[in-house]
Amino acid sequence: MLKSKTSLFLICLFVGYFAIPCFAAPIELMSASGSRVRPLNLQGQKAGVYIFIAHDCPIANSYAPEINRIVKKYTPQKIAFYIIYTEADTPITELKAHAKSYAYNCPALFDRKHELVLKTGAKVTPEAVVITQDGKIAYRGRIDDRNADFGKMKQEASVHDLREALDSVVHDKIPPHKSTLAIGCFIPPLK
Amino acid sequence: MVSQISMWKIQILINLLLLVTISSAKASPLTYYQNIAPIFEKRCISCHHDGGGAPISFTTYESVKRRAKQIVIVTKSRFMPPWKPDPSCGVLADSRRLSNEELAAISSWAATGANSGNANAFSGLKQRAPVSEWSNGRPDVILQAKNAFQIPAEGPDSYASFLLADIPNFSEEQIDRIWKNGIRGVEFKFGNSSFIRYAMLFVDTTRVTRQLMLEYRDKGFFPRSGPSLVSIGAFFEWTPGSHAQMLPKNTSMPVRQGGDLVLLVRFHPTGKREAVTPRVGVYLNKHPSPHSQISIPMGVGMIDIPAGSSSYTASTSITFPVPVTLNGCSPHAEHVCKEINAAITFPDGEQKPLFCIKDWDADWQESYRFLNPINIPAGTKIEVTCKYDNSSANSRNPFSPPRRMMSGMHHVNQMEGLWLHIIPTNEKDIQRLTFALEEKTMNDMTSSR
């Protein structure tokens, strides 16, 4: 009896010892190119932009060209971009094929355990989250106002929220809005 | 005494427990297999299956459960399933409109855990023909566009018109048979069709498409919506979820000698470049048919809507000089249109609504069939009214700030209104219908001045 109690104590100690650094470990996700990436490591950058998508979300897909234009414009201004696939069980091969066909010009990562989804509070796809180098969320919400509601899509956006937020961040200013409502496909919670 | 009190307590407790059991039995949560799958089979799966045209497939419990929250929102707002006609006017076949009970069931199921239940409670989804196969057997003629059409990654919807008559494997004998016997049915095939919003196969007897095509011979298609039909037309339409369409027995779509078959397709950008080579399977009649299905354009005439106006109304009417059977209708209008109403007045004065859409959305333009074809005696009048909102309050207004909208300009259809799909009781009456239509067009032109 005593023996089993001692061993239980030892196991707890053992697990606890490793669990603490494990919980504190930086988020590391697999990318479409096969490497492991720490997207929150923003060394040498002003901010990171995380664009949450789902391969079968038509609204998210329709934004691919605009996402690529934004990446192209702001990457030289020390902004790191990541496409974040929010699907937990869609085969990785399918997601990789999707990333290739939409030709995203920034790393695409698979958030299978929703580590980034939970950390950033993203609720729908597409939704963009801007995190500054000090780890604070500077903006979370829609890319622009093209979608007024489901099925009500304007041909052109009149307010470019993500671009406005990034224009502020690159000039060390606070974005005009900290958050906006993104219209898109809900990110289903994990089982 | 003490024991008596405890007995009461026990009795009360038992009663309470019973009550809880009964009420929980009453409100036992709905399950996917028992309550939800049948609704999805009836209203959603025709599009939401692999290759069905919708971007998301809902053929498994997991796929529906995963999107349960979204499904509740888009069904409550009636964005999905898309079914624009109002149930208060006319009874249509194959309605995808969710009943209030079905809506409540979906909400309740999602709110109580979105459980699967026992798979044996549901007989299973209908078998659907794979994308690559023809659902009515091999067509007599397969028309295929010469070249693929390239759809840009973004921007407004684009149109292309394909002239389908002069294709290599189309024999003289087949052309002859089409002209003589007409078309019995069609099936459109677009492969992955999530980027196609609308398609129409029509007969162009004006040879205008042929002329236009001379300029675009290398491309194999005309990059716009081609000529508009202003006279009696004959066509089949495709919208997401459509399948093979066959006309009633002994009926065909007439293709007058020399008429060209033109396929008009409306493409919707999806975020990446796509290419498509549309195909249409055509089923021919073996013999000339005694009846023809033709379409009467009930256009509301020339429209001219001032910028900012939210109360512009235009209407038109026709009195049928001959008896016909009314099979269905196709509303056609652009984004500033809000309402389309059609009413029927029988010769004895009886009036009833025929068809109406209260929240028009040009993105969901489709062809509707009446559940029971309506036999119309000669002297019956049909009136069509369109209401427009060209103000900035209309979230579907393509222009901000609003612009003056006129027929033929700025995305405005040449034919704004309703096509009526009819079968004349006597085939020889088509000529008289043409005269009546010409008279209607003249009236519309005079009244719009």
Image: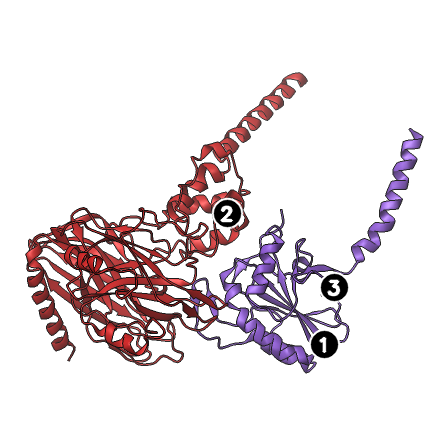
Provide the letter of the chain coloured red. B
Q: Is residue B237 left or right of residue B35?
A: left
Residue A124 visible in rendering:
no
Vertical side of A27 occupied by B224: above or below: below
In the figure, the shade used to draw chain A is purple
Whole-number angstrom distance, CA of label 2 to CA of label 3:
33 Å
Q: Chain of mark 2?
A: B
SS of the residue under disc 3: loop
Q: Nearer the viewer, residue B415 or B358?
A: B415
The amino acid type found where label 2 is placed reads Val
Q: Nearer the viewer, residue A154 or B353?
A: A154
Q: Nearer the viewer, residue B121 or A181?
A: B121
Disc nearest the viewer among 1 and 3: 3
Whole-number angstrom distance, CA of label 1 to CA of label 3:
16 Å
Q: Position of residue A11 (x, y in %)?
A: 87, 41
Disc nearest the viewer among 2 and 3: 3
Q: Chain of mark 1?
A: A
Discs 1 and 3 lie in a common subunit:
yes
Circle 2 sits on which residue? B64
SS of the residue under disc 2: helix
Quarter holding residue B356: bottom left
Q: Are marks 2 and 3 in contact (CB under 8 Å)?
A: no
Residue shown at 62% from the left, 23% from the top: B9
Circle 1 sits on which residue? A46
Residue A38: assigned label: 3
Whole-number angstrom distance, CA of label 1 to CA of label 2:
40 Å
Residue shown at 41% from the left, 49% from the top: B44
Q: Position of residue B281 (x, y in %)?
A: 30, 55
The amino acid type found where label 3 is placed reads Arg
Q: Is residue B25 left or right of residue B366?
A: right
Q: Chain of mark 3?
A: A
SS of the residue under disc 1: loop
